[in-house]
Amino acid sequence: MGRMLLGALVGSIVLFAWGFLYWAVLPIADNIVLPVPNEAAVAQMLKENIPSSGVYYIPGEGAKERSQAWVEKHKAGPIAQIFFRREGINPTDPMFYARGFGYMLFCAFLGAWLLKTALPGLESYAARAIFVVMVGFFGAAVAFSGAVWWYQWLPYHLLYVAFNVTAWVFAGLAMAAIVKPD
């Protein structure tokens, strides 16, 4: 149990550090996550037209009954999903990063627990590392559903898949060294 918890802690530190490098330092996302042209006007329009925080979909009207008007709106475009937080946040608040680290710790704990559960069949370091990488790859594949079902931009999802797979390669290398048979 001690190795599993230590593996989860080290794995979460690796995930958090790689997340910082991938998203904040390296220019990987620069041509994929784009700024909105005329941002101030678009932000004002959103505030004026969306009453509360939530997820909104265009075209939304008629979606439940799949009306012909809804189908025609889909064909004509635009199609959008808006993840809207009306009240904003302070991105420099330490709690923002603490929640992010807590999320990484939770994910690493799940990975370490799965690794510990599978240990009888994973005697070698390479087998353990590959197992953790495949757990991460599985999670990335599941999260890819937005590109399939919600028409979300493919390069955006490939960016996230690349992050998750590389993050779990690094975390897997670290965790496999710690979570091992007695």
Image: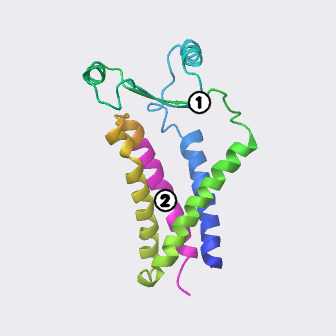
The answer to which of marks 1 and 2 sits earlier in the sequence is 1
Does residue 172 lie above or below 127 as drawn?
above
Q: Is residue 93 left or right of residue 11?
A: right
Across and down, in percent, residue 102 comes to 65, 55
Point out the image quarter for the C terminus.
bottom right
Q: Nearer the viewer's eye, disc 1 or disc 2?
A: 1
Residues at marks 1 and 2 touching, judged by CB atoms closer than 8 Å: no
Mark linked to residue 168: 2
Viewer-proximal residue, 80 or 61?
Answer: 61
Across and down, in percent, residue 94 comes to 75, 44
Name the quadrant containing residue 11.
bottom right
Residue at 43 percent of width and 56 percent of height: 139
Secondary structure under the numbered disc 1 in the rendered image: loop
Q: Determine which residue is flagged by label 1.
A: 53
Name the quadrant containing residue 113.
bottom right
Point out the image quarter for the N terminus.
bottom right
Viewer-proximal residue, 24 or 95?
Answer: 95
Does residue 110 lie above or below 154 as drawn?
below
Q: Which residues are magenta?
A: 158-182
Q: Dot 2 surroundings within 10 Å: few (below 14), some, or many (20 or more)? A: many
**Amino acid on which disc 1 is placed:** Ser
